[in-house]
Image (tube, grey):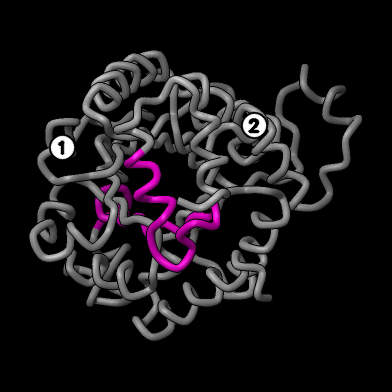
Amino acid sequence: MTPAVKTILDKFESTSPAVKANLARILMQGRLGGTGKLLILPVDQGFEHGPARSFAINPAGYDPHYHWQLAIDAGLSAFAAPLGMIEAGADTFGAQMPTILKVNSSNSWATSIDQAITGSVADAVRLGCAAIGFTLYPGSDKIFDMMEEIRALSEEAKAAGIATVIWSYPRGGDLTKDGELALDVGAYAAHMAALLGAHIIKTKLPTDHIEQKEAKPIYAKGDWSTQSKRVAHMVQASFAGRRINVFSGGASKGEDSVFQDARDIRDGGGHGSIIGRNTFQRPRDEALAMLDRIIRIYLGEE
């Protein structure tokens, strides 16, 4: 274990040796292993957006093995996916790559802002996963049910020696569309995930918009003009960096934007990226080249 990883793990004061071992599996894996930075491939978009919208642009992506192999060949930190996709490659690839079992899911037809429980801690143990992943929607009318679900799942996961990752995505209630990506809202969402016991927090990169009326005078005192400064504030909200904060790749975008996001995450003290569509929707060679460059950015090589 490197000093950088030990420093991160030392911040989890009540975490069992078994959970720390699984966090170390992720933090020590791949080309970023030992640096304290992470690059994770999530492939839950088939649930969230449908297979055609997710994979038709690069039909190789219909095959779960394609994504497993992409994560391994790119030297990534972990592979995150719902139950069926992890089951489809567990024997072939499971020993080569730490996995995060996404235990709740939604679909693009649902009218309520909620997710169903689609996997269990028992599934994660059976499949040798390093962590469970759970999407939380702060702002939703279902938020208190979701909080109770992740409290129970996280308690069970920790008892089984498995880490907890929370996707904390503000949505619903009185939030505007701009508010979903607002800095004050994003920081609140990250802090909520930390308070719920997440070891790794996944959030979206925030804009400089401030949504909450009560928060505007407070944020008016700061300079949020650059994305790296906003990333630093998200890390600050995650228990002053005592919890691992990785950032979503978001909707499909140009390569230059993806690389600039990585620089801003690095410069703001974020722990890395969890990036899916912006890689696997490209041809394999282009995806590998993109992931290689993101890794080099996190390594400080450019």
Q: Is residue 35 magenta?
A: yes
Instruction: Judge whether residue 297 can be spotted in this image.
Output: yes
Q: Which residues are magenta?
A: 21-50
**Numbered circle sitting on residue 187:** 2
Q: Is residue 302 magenta?
A: no
In x, y percent, where is residue 155?
30, 19
Relative to 289, is 45 above or below? above
Relative to 3, is 146 above or below? above
Amino acid under label 1?
Val
SS for callout 2? helix
- Seen at 56% across and 29% down, the residue is 189
- Seen at 25% across and 22% down, the residue is 159
Q: Nearer the viewer, mark 2 or mark 1?
A: 1
SS for callout 1? helix
Relative to 251, is 140 above or below? above
Amino acid under label 2?
Ala
Residues at marks 2 and 1, CA–CA distance in whole angstroms: 32 Å
**Numbered circle sitting on residue 125:** 1
In x, y percent, where is residue 80?
31, 51
The front one of 22 and 220 is 22
In x, y percent, where is residue 286?
43, 83
The front one of 161 and 222 is 161
In x, y percent, where is residue 116?
23, 30
Q: Earlier in the sequence, mark 2 or mark 1?
A: 1
- Seen at 39% across and 37% down, the residue is 165
**Residue at the extreme right:** 221
How packed is label 2: few (under 14 Cα within 10 Å), some, or many (20 or more)?
A: many
Left or right: where does residue 89 sit relative to residue 38?
A: left
